[in-house]
Image (spheres, rainbow, N blue to C red):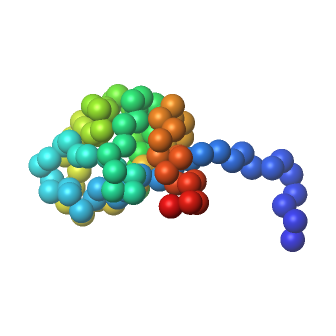
């Protein structure tokens, strides 16, 4: 069945690597990676972060320091995590992901 209505927006959205295996209920700062390589988002407002199934508010719940995310409170050791990059000016990861010659 064909899609009825407005076409969905598409873009270069990226899903960062899962860091939940590092959660220990006491650490608040974690490395952000994309495909195992350091990822520098630059702006916390360019990320959609879910922690324990709850979307986190930039600045109030987390900040970005270089290639690390720092939460306002330590995530529970059993919390799940995902992070989607909504916008970036860092095009190197995009080139790597779309380079079919590798």
From the viewer's side, name the closer residue of 53 and 82.
82
Residue farthest bottom in this picture: 1
94 shown above or below 89: below
What residue do we see at 86% from left, 52% from top? Answer: 5
Residue placed at 34% from the left, 51% from the top? 37
Decide if residue 52 is in sight here. Answer: no
The N terminus sits in image quarter: bottom right
- Against 92, residue 64 (above or below) is above
**What x and y, as percent, mark residue 51?**
35, 51
Q: Quadrant of residue 67?
A: top left
Total marks in image: 0
Question: Which residue is most to the left?
Answer: 26
Q: Residue at x 52, y 54 (%)?
A: 97
Q: Is residue 22 left or right of residue 45?
A: left
Q: Is 82 on the left or on the right of 96, as rendered?
A: left
- Residue sitting nearer the eye, 55 or 86: 86
Q: Is residue 90 above or below residue 80?
A: above
In this rendering, position of residue 21 left or right of residue 24: right
Left or right of 68, for residue 42: right
Observer able to see residue 65 = yes
**Residue 55 image point, x, y percent:** 43, 45
Q: Residue at x 14, y 47 (%)?
A: 27
């Amino acid at each position: 069945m064909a899609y009825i209505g407005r076409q969905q927006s598409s873009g270069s959205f990226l899903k960062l690597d899962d860091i939940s295996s590092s959660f220990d209920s006491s650490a608040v700062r974690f490395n952000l990676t994309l495909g195992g390589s350091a990822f520098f988002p630059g702006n916390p407002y360019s990320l959609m972060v879910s922690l324990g199934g709850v979307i986190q508010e930039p600045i109030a719940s987390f900040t970005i320091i270089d290639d690390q995310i720092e939460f306002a409170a330590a995530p529970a050791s059993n919390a799940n995590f995902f992070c989607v990059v909504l916008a970036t000016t860092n095009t190197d990861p995009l080139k790597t992901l779309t380079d079919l010659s590798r």
